[in-house]
Structures are given as structure tokens and as C-alpha cells.
Amino acid sequence: MTAAEATPQLDFPEEAAHSDRAFLGHPKGLGYLGVVEGCERFSYYSMQTLLTLYMVKYLLVPGRQESVIGLEWLKTHLFSGLEGQPLASEIFGTYTALVYLTPILGGLLADLLLGRRAALIAGAVIMSLGHFLMAFEGAFLLALLSLVIGVGLFKGNIASQVGELYGANDIRRAMAFQIFYIFINVSVIAAPLISGTLGEKIGWHWGFGAAGVVMVIGLLIYLAARPWLPADKPRTAKSDQARVKFEPGDGARLAAVLVLVPILGFSLLTNQQIFNAYLVWADQQFQLTFIGTTLPTSWMITLDATLSFSMLVAVAAFWAFVGKRTGKEPDELGKMILGCVFILGGALCLYMAALTQGTGKIGLFWPVMFHLVNSIGFSHLLPVSLALFTRLAPRALNASIVGIYYLAFFGANLAVGKIGTLFETMPTTQFWLLHAGTAMVGLVGFGLFKLLLAKRLMGAPKPA
């Protein structure tokens, strides 16, 4: 699954600032926020799709990498002895890991100092700057730093504005987040087709530039949408006091969250490797020629995004059907265990692709099967795991638990960078078996948690 996108359960004010139905029966602000988020996700996934290929095929080669400011220091102090693809893997892993860490700090800055609107605008400006800095090879690391900071300020400070368009009892809110999510998925599907094609076929800087232009468009739309968006709400002593109260059983629920985070991290590894070593492998070994034309490798990401969105809908519909027919369906942990089974199956599809390659290029049967099976697995894991974490979260730590949840993605991406350094030296079959092993760790971990710790640490579900 391409995007790790989900929206936590948040507390919203009783009265919404706007309750019109100008956009598909929803407030006009929802359309604006959806487009803005779509622009941000387009720019982010354009960057993530091109980054490793850009480094491996263009930037980190002798005669060109010497111009990158700070790279020699990085190679000496952090990634000693690494060159080429292994170095690219470490840089990719560090960058994507930090993208999941900085939104925690961005949320704190928004809550305590800047306010959501100012934080979001600052984030969009800094992200746009980062994309345009990618046009200058010497500024590569500064560009990555700008993008990390920009995403941290932007992400998280837009989703809560969606909820505040509605009153506390407005039944349209749930559908609003589904519409919001559609904007995200359309952008993730489009980004590799547009920026990926420009970057690979015309010039890398064209792809990065397209991401920057779209981000600027998103910023301008957000500024124009101000009359239809909720204003920042000042913090009050009463609300602050309410947030620090703990209830019986909160300690056990917090312990459950802390145990589940590393298990979730292991289960994410295969999926997160899609943008890193997998793309390098696809570029080198997949049969991507169609009617005499070599298709951009980045289109594999569009395939993944399309299947991801389709499987999210299909899996939700399947369990709704099962629940209606039988009155039963697996609980969150049961679905997460099932998800790990499919993720394990996806990794084994990659193993089969490597095992059966022979002397020619790899056909697309096993890669397509990987994206399909992995997407089914992730559809059982991603939304369900966030739902579980928010259910476990003590009321006093609801927002903090969401931040802790994303630490699993932080750790997984760091590990992806480390494991990706083995791609060139380890037989490809063993490389993907290693990923199957990480999925097995997740499967066993969730299974043991369900058998041995779930009742003790989770207890009964919290009352609504």
C-alpha cells in the first residue's frame, strides 16, 4: 500500500463555523481542504517516488556527488563507507523516517505557539522551497531538510480543520473524511504518472519542479479559502485541565500501545521498501517495455496506489458483507494478524519473482501479484491499527497516542534504509526472504499479544 494515511478520532466543538451544503452536500470548506491536501500529497509522493532513483541513477555518482553541500560530512560521520545505492538507501530511510517524526513537533508548535493556520501556511511555504531547491544539486540535503520541516508543520494541522467544519452531532463528518481521503488517493495515483514521467523521461528537475508548482497552487488555494474555513480556537485553562486527567485502566492501555508499536513497525517494513530498493530493482530488472517503449519505473507506484485504494474499498465491503450475513467478524487484532499473513504472502511473491527470473528480465506477473496481495494485507493493517490505537488511548493522551502510533512508521523507515543497503551485496532471493521474515515477526508478535496480553492490558473497550 502506497500511502500511510489515516485520520484520528478528534474532539470537535459543539457548533461548527460553517454548516452549508455547497460541496456535494457538505460545507464548501471541505472541497478547499481536500484540494489543498491533495496538492500536498501530490508533491510529497512525487518526491518519494523520484528520490531513490534520482540518487542512484544521477546524483550519487562520481563526478557529481562532490558538488552536494554536506554530503562528505554525512558520509564520514553517519554513513561511513557507503557509496551509490547503499548510501541512497540510508538517505532515503532517514528522510522518510523524519517525515513521520516532525509532525509531532509541528502539532506542538501549532497548539502552543503558531496556531494551526499559521503552521500550515509556513509548512506549505517551506515545502515549496524544498522542492525548488531540488533544482540545485548542491542544495540537495538542504532541500530534504526543508521538506522534512515543511511536512512536519503541514501534516496533522489540516485534518483537524475538516472535523471543525461540522457540529458535534453532524452525521456528515464520517463521510467528510472519506471524501477527504479520496482527494489523497487521487493525488497519490497521479503523482508518479506526472512527476515520475517528467523526472525519468525529460529531466529529474522537471519532476521535482512539478511537485513544487503543485504545492504552491495548494498554498494559494488555502489562502483563498479562508472565509470558508474554521478559525483557530484559543486554548483555555479548562480544556488544558481536562486533558491531564487519567482514568482507571489508562496505565494498562498505555502499556499495550507501547508493546504494539514495535510489532507494527516490523509488519510495515515490506510495504515501506516499495519506494526504496524495490524501485531500484524494478528499474534494473523488470520488463517494462510495452510496444517498443520503455515505461517509467515510477508507474509501478501508480499501480500500487490504484490497487491500494481498490483493496481498501473491497476489504471494507467484504467485512461489512460478512458481518451482515453472519453477525461476526474478526476484532482489530484478528484483522491485523490476517493482514500480516497477506503481507508475508506479498513478500513471498517478490521472492518468487527473483527465484524464477532466469537470464532475462522479470515479467510483471509476480510484481503485480505482490502489489495486489500486499495491498490486501495493508488494508487489514493500516486503518484497523490506527482505530485500535485510538481506542486504547487514554482520554488524557489521545493526540499523543496518535503521535506514538506514527513512531512505528518512523522506526520502519529507518530500518528500510538500513536493510536497503544490503540490496547490492545480498542475493535478491535472500533479500526478499528477509522481508518475509519481518512480516512473520509481525504475525507472531500480534498473535502472541492477542493470546497472552490482550485481555490483561486492553481490558474492555472504553465507553463512547
Image (spheres, grey):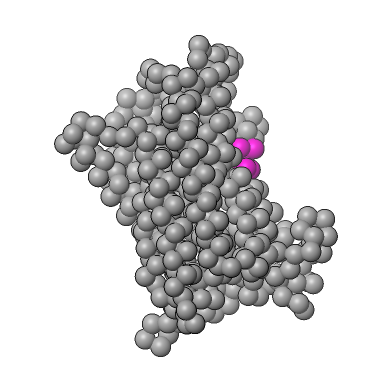
Q: Nearer the viewer, residue 301 or 262?
A: 262
Question: Which of 48/441 is in front?
Answer: 441
Total of numbered circles in the picture?
Answer: 0
Q: Is residue 158 visible?
A: no
Q: Position of residue 316 (x, y in %)?
A: 29, 43
Q: Residue 66: horizontal and vertical position, in percent?
A: 79, 72
Question: What span is in magenta?
Answer: 101-106
Q: Quadrant of the N terminus?
A: bottom left
Is residue 287 visible in the rendered image? The answer is yes
Does residue 60 appear left or right of residue 18 in this picture?
Answer: right
Residue at point 43% right, 21% down? 455
Q: Residue at x 32, y 25 (%)?
A: 169
Q: Residue furthest bottom?
A: 292
Q: Position of residue 254 (x, y in %)?
A: 55, 24
| Residue 77 falls within the magenta-colored stretch | no
Residue 323 lies, with reference to residue 67, above or below; the image says above
Residue 239's x, y, as percent? Answer: 54, 17
Magenta part, dominant SS: helix
Which residue is found at the position 72% from the left and 75% from the top? 61
Which residue extends farthest top?
248
Residue 67 appears left or right of 214: right
Q: Quadrant of the C terminus?
A: top left
> In the figure, is residue 205 to the left or right of 228?
right
At x 47%, y 79%, the residue is 358
Outermost left residue: 325
Is residue 102 magenta-colored? yes
Give the quadrant of residue 258: top right
